Amino acid sequence: MISGKIRKMMESSSFIRKMFETGARLKLEYGEDNVFDFSLGNPAMDPPGTFTETLLEKAADLHMHRYMPNAGYVDVRKKIADYISSEQETKITENNVVMTSGAGGALNTVLKTLINSGDKVIASIPCFMEYKFYCDNHGGELELVKGKSDFNLDINAIETAITKETAAVIINSPNNPSGRIYPQETIDNLALMLERKSNETGRTIYLISDEPYRKIVYDNLTVPQVMDAYKNSIICTSYSKDLSIPGERIGWLTVNPEAEDYTNLINGIILCNRILGFVNAPALMQRTIAELQGVSVDIDLYRRKRDYLAKKLAEFGYKFRVPEGTFYFFVEAPEGDDMKIVDMLQKERILVVPGRGFSLPGYFRIAYCVEDSVIEGSMTGFERTARKSGLKQDEK
């Protein structure tokens, strides 16, 4: 019999995966072309051509399959460090970078390094709820605080939640599920508050920035750099979204070289990368992405999908904040009932995720990283559901 703890986790597991599994069942029943699945942030876009070319070239290297340092290949980390240095306006070397099995692997190694049993990690609602399981993996607890109505961070709410048991704060910008980019002023104010609270509690509070959507931004916006704002910062990211390779599980983390207890922190993370069973990030993927710094899929294709959806959803009467980044819409549920609208849309064979899957009932998430045919084919169902829900339609 499996453990009671895992049984409870399974019962409360991700709404995203549940909806994805529902979609798979419906596709078998009705045919794939007749189901419109917006449940999972699983990019349908192919990787850039340079990725495939580089992958084939690196796969031919017969000497790349041996063990390596647990932090990853030194030459790979050097190339990434050079790129981060220009992006973050902070001098980063290969010694500050650890290659990981995606952003999930990065977050788990960091949390295992930082958390003592009973410690807490703070995140702002709405957020990616796997954070809860990641914290629990290492004896910690995720403490959720409310964000502002525009999905920005509420610095006062975060400050109120901080105690001597607070090990870290996790932020995710651009944010899944809201698409919000936290402004520079917000990051600066968060940094000042964390520095003050670290001094008050006598414990360093680390800022963990989860950034897999950093390159997927629109309208000439930029994502503020956390390292320049706060010395006790750690960035975790992956190439899953910007290179459209989520199945390859490749990412990295970097620790601010100015962080307190830096040497123990980076060495602890490298140790945890090994003992958690990752050992090291996949060798072939390391060699491949090393040559693709700054490369991404065509973000303009996502922008066009966003703009089309924004226009149509507004016409049907749905209320939402146009996403500044990511490939998600976070839409207000009519009458505030996210489960009801999710069920109504499912009857139209449209799969979306209820807001409670991100600890914010009253909304639902649409992942528009899908083929145009899925978006276009779903419009009749979205409109019919809007009418049944009593939403006011715009004049066409």
Image (cartoon, grey):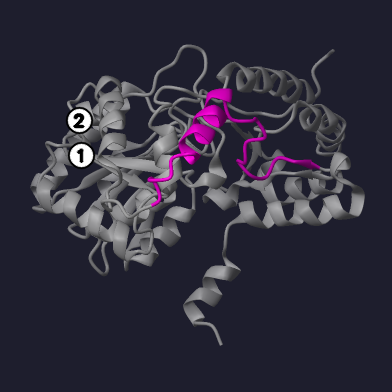
**In the rendered structure, which segment of residues is drawn in magenta?**
36-65
68 to the left or right of 369: left
Could you say whether the residue bearing mark 1 is in a helix, strand or loop?
Answer: helix
Tell me what residue is drawn at x 56 percent, y 20 percent: 299
* Secondary structure of residue under mark 2: loop
Q: Image height check: is 304 above or below 154? A: above
As drawn, 1 above or below 396: below
The type of residue carrying mark 2 is Ile
Residue 212, quarter of picture = top left
Q: Quadrant of residue 232?
A: top left
Residue 80 versus residue 15 in the image, above or below = above
Q: Quadrant of residue 152?
A: top left
| Mark 1 closeness class: few <14, some 14–19, many ≥20 residues within 10 Å | many
Q: Taking the image as drawn, is residue 3 in sight?
A: yes
Towards the viewer: 298 or 344: 298
Residue 44: image location, x then y, percent: 67, 35
Queried whether the magenta region covers residue 62, the answer comes back as yes
Residue at 45% x, 41% y: name it: 285
- Which residue corresponds to the image point at 61% horizontal and 19% vertical from the top-left? 303
Residue 235 x %, y % = 31, 39
Residue contact at pointers 2 and 1, CB within 8 angstroms:
yes
Q: Which residue carries the number 1 mark? A: 96
- The residue furthest right is 30
Viewer can see residue 337: no
Of residues 386 and 108, the one nearer the viewer is 108
Label 2 belongs to which residue? 92
- Residue 391 position within the rendered picture, expressed as x and y whole percent measured from the top left: 78, 31
Front in this rendered view, residue 10 or 253: 253
Left-right relation of 90 to 147 = left
Q: CA distance from mark 2 to mark 1?
A: 6 Å
